[in-house]
Image (cartoon, helix red, strand yellow):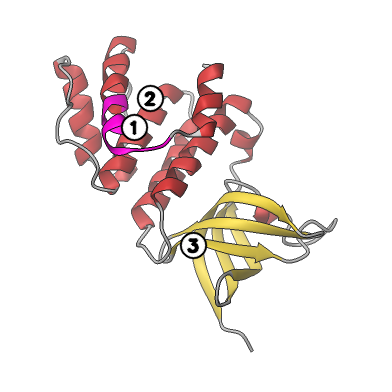
Amino acid sequence: MRDTVTVMAMVMKTAPSGEYDRRLVLLTRDRGKITAFARGARRPGNALMAPCRTFAFGTFRLFEGREAYTLHSAEISNYFQEIAADMEAACYGSYFLELCDYYSRENMDAEPLLKLAYQSLRALSKPSIPRKLVRRIFELKAMVINGEYTERPTLAVSDSANYTWEYVVSSPIESLFRFTVTESVLKEFGDCVDDNMRRYIDRTFKSLEILETMI
């Protein structure tokens, strides 16, 4: 009998595999980024069909193999259906997961990154905070989690933009999405985040390119 493991995770990627299966890339709290196959998930009425959606977050029970995992069952606590149904929100969310995929590795402690992804997706659904600000907070905090940031902005900015930067760098993830800023401060803050990303990230993101044609 194969060993089973239970992980808290979010589906970052999902793609067809073979005639009836799906291949998932999961961001897990304790095992980092892993690949799992959901056998028969593309058959109508299969119980694994719903947990294979992008953004699905919950507890996944897996059979552990040599090179990949096989999904046995899942208890999903949040499908983020409101994001999947909103084109712009889905583009933001896809970009967040693409950046998580870039940073995550197998067997790493991914709890902070997973928590950031979850809280950022929740923030996308709140009308009280602009999505552009959610994006910038997510980007900077993802770099902070991975040790790729400067304590203060590298560009000359206003006191308000400087404070925004320092707040995101130092605050716990649960407290990140409790403020808003003016358009001018958001522009300064965004420019600083972009500068930081040019310093530390050596690739482009397809979902970001699509997003920037929409906003």
One can see residue 104 in this view: yes
Asked if residue 101 is positioned above or below residue 205 in the image, the reply reads below
Q: Position of residue 21 (x, y in %)?
A: 75, 61
Alpha carbon distance from label 1 to label 2: 6 Å
Question: Looking at the magenta stretch, what is its main secondary structure?
Answer: helix
Residue range (magenta): 194-203
The quadrant of the picture occupied by the N terminus is: bottom right
Judge the density around disc 2: few (<14), some (14-19), many (≥20) Cα neighbours within 10 Å: many
Residue at image position (70%, 58%) is: 22
The residue where tag 3 is placed is 8
The picture places residue 79, in percent across and down from the top left corner, at: 61, 47
Callout 1: few (<14), some (14-19), or many (20+) C-alpha neighbours within 10 Å?
A: many
Disc assigned to residue 153: none
Mark 3 or mark 2: name the one nearer the start of the chain: 3
Q: Label 2 near label 1: C-beta < 8 Å?
A: yes
Element at label 2: helix
Query: Residue, x 75% and y 62% (percent of image)?
Result: 47
Which amino acid lies under the numbered mark 2 shown in the image of this protein? Leu
Q: What residue sits 68% from the left and 51% below the top?
A: 15
Position above or below: 155 against 91: above
Dividing the picture into quadrants, the one containing residue 192 is top left
Looking at the image, the residue that sits furthest to the front is 202
User: What's the amino acid at mark 3?
Assistant: Met
Q: Is residue 106 left or right of residue 67?
A: left
Q: Which residue is mark 1?
A: 137
Q: Which residue is mark 2?
A: 133
Q: Residue at x 30, y 41 (%)?
A: 143
- In-image side of 165 versus 94 (left or right): left
